[in-house]
Amino acid sequence: MTSVPEFSFSHMGMFVTDAARMEDFYTRVLGFAVTDRGMLGSTSLVFLSRDPKEHHQIVLASGRPPAAGFNTVNQISFRMADFAGLREMHRRLQAEAVKELAPVSHGNALSVYFKDPEGNRIELFIDTPWYVQQPVRIAMDMSLSDADLWRWAESEARKLPGFKPAEEWSSAFTRNLSRKLRQPQ
């Protein structure tokens, strides 16, 4: 049996009942900045970060019912050390027959989503060198060769709004975040 590929914790998503109130709290009180927002189906998403190297550290997702007992965690995300590790984990997850195994491109990341044995959504991903406006979710064919998959991913990303090199997005975000943190509250 091969060893488990290297990865690290990256970000989390949580379901919310009042996205505007939560956005205000996380931006005004905790100093996060909105990096993107949009709809994915009927779910409204707000992406937040305090780190110019991280497009998002928290994702606020609409859809939390007011009833107690609902799991507010939308997903737990882990950044893979490399694409080979993402491929290996995809292979392992197929062999494990996990539920809802879904490889996708977000334009700025290539991800593999799945449910753990108790139904919690997990994301394993690698960053791409591009930025595109979020949210984006395009089904990805992991049977393609590495070269073909990367060509496909770049081609798809170039079609999306806001396409630019990730470094360009990060520099602009750094300037905006610095201005925001210098403003009196």
Image: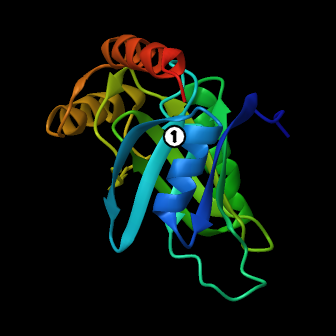
Q: Considering the image in quadrants, where does the N terminus appear?
A: top right
Q: Is residue 163 left or right of residue 34?
A: left
Q: Is residue 115 left or right of residue 136?
A: right
Q: Nearer the viewer, residue 113 or 148?
A: 113
Q: Position of residue 92 (x, y in %)?
A: 70, 50
Q: Nearer the viewer, residue 59 or 34?
A: 34
Q: Residue at x 14, y 38 (%)?
A: 159
Q: Residue at x 64, y 31 (%)?
A: 80
Position of 82 relative to 1 (above/below): above
Q: Is residue 8 left or right of residue 39?
A: right
Q: Nearer the viewer, residue 54 or 67?
A: 67
Q: Which residue extends farthest bottom?
A: 67
Query: How many tags in the picture?
Result: 1
Q: Which residue extends farthest front?
A: 184
Secondary element at tag 1: strand
Q: Position of residue 46 (x, y in %)?
A: 44, 51
Q: Which residue extends farthest left?
A: 159
Q: Nearer the viewer, residue 46 or 28?
A: 28
Residue 183 visible in the displayed image: yes
Position of 169 relative to 49 (above/below): above
Q: Which residue is mark 1?
A: 48
Colour scheme of the picture: rainbow
Residue 169 occupies quadrant: top left
Q: Residue at x 48, y 20 (%)?
A: 183
Q: Residue at x 55, y 30 (%)?
A: 185
Position of 3 relative to 130 (above/below): below
Residue 87 visible in the displayed image: no
Q: Position of residue 49 (x, y in %)?
A: 54, 33
Q: Amino acid at mark 1?
A: Leu
